[in-house]
Amino acid sequence: MSNDDSRSRGRLVPAVAVGLLFAVLALTVLSADFGEVAAFPADASIVHNIGYALFNLGEYELGSVPAEGFLAAFLIAAVALDVAVDGAVYLAKREEDGSIVAAVGEALTDGGREGGER
């Protein structure tokens, strides 16, 4: 048995697993009953409803759109974006000789002149 045969067999098992997973997901989506499509009322403001739900102002009902589902999605997206920004800042930091250096390099706070008072 050559080394190329073992490599192709090592790639065959994950490829078959991915194909089976795709088939299961496709069958699940195609056989699902999503029900009838419903639309929002023309005069309803989803943004206002989310704002009222954030501040628990339910007694000032603005429209007939329940905002709890939107509120959960809004908060989950906000946390995910915050984690992404924090990760980007962390990855942008550089280290030189064991000390952390700012991602933008040396910041000159005296108007851009070197040798200024500190």
Image (tube, rainbow, N blue to C red):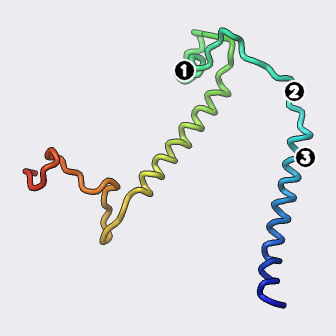
3D distance between C-alphas at marks 2 and 3: 17 Å
Say which element carries label 3. helix
3D distance between C-alphas at marks 1 and 2: 29 Å
Q: Residue at x 48, y 52 (%)?
A: 87
Say which element carries label 1. helix
- Kind of residue indicated by mark 3: Leu
Alpha-carbon neighbours of circle 2 within 10 Å: few (<14), some, or many (≥20)? few
**Residue 9 at x, y = what percent?**
83, 77
- If you read the primary sequence from the N terminus, does the residue marked by circle 1 or circle 2 appear first? 2
Q: Report which quarter residue 101 is drawn in.
A: bottom left
- Kind of residue indicated by mark 2: Gly
3D distance between C-alphas at marks 1 and 3: 39 Å
- If you read the primary sequence from the N terminus, does the residue marked by circle 1 or circle 3 appear first? 3
**Residue 68 at x, y = what percent?**
65, 25
Q: Which mark is residue 27?
A: 3
Q: Which mark is residue 51?
A: 1
- Kind of residue indicated by mark 1: Gly
Say which element carries label 2. loop
What residue did someone put label 2 on? 35
Count of numbered marks? 3
Which of the image's four quarters has the N terminus?
bottom right
